[in-house]
Amino acid sequence: MGEKLKFSFSVKSLSNQDQKLIIDYRIHFVKANGKPSVKVFKLKNLILGPKEQVEIEKVHHIKEVTTRDYYDGLHIIDVQVNGVIKKSGRFTLSGAQKKQ
């Protein structure tokens, strides 16, 4: 808790035409019952030229917010391009405050 989750990835076009991309990331937050709850975060809209590659970096702050309770455990993060999941990773959260 109170830390930053930093991640980066590359997107490369294999097409011979411009491509309009909507890039989001999803975090599967652990709920109180231990099951995941997915939240989608908007990241970037762009047009990628033929055979072009772009590097994307993001910092997601893990901090107390009124709309979400955090729980310790293994969380999953996905990168999604035009609604299709392209890459997944994992991180462990510890030190989350328990609600009384």
Image (cartoon, grey):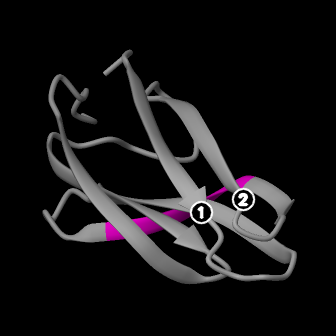
Q: Nearer the viewer, residue 76 or 88?
A: 88
Question: Residue at 43% across / 68% down in the picture?
Answer: 38
In whole angstroms, how far apart are the C-alphas of marks 1 and 2?
6 Å
Q: Is residue 12 left or right of residue 96?
A: right
Q: Position of residue 47 (x, y in %)?
A: 87, 64
Query: Which residue, given by chain and number where applicable, does mark 2 sit on?
Result: 52
Picture quarter containing residue 49?
A: bottom right
Is residue 94 rendered magenta in the image? no
Q: Nearer the viewer, residue 87 or 74?
A: 87
Which kind of residue does numbered mark 1 sit on?
Lys
Q: Is residue 13 left or right of residue 70?
A: right
Residue 78 position (above or below residue 65): below
Q: Are marks 1 and 2 in contact (CB under 8 Å)?
A: yes
Question: Residue at 19% across / 70% down in the picture?
Answer: 35
Q: Is residue 69 left or right of residue 79?
A: left
Query: Which residue, given by chain and number where applicable, does mark 1 sit on?
Result: 12
Would residue 65 be visible to someone looking at this image?
A: no
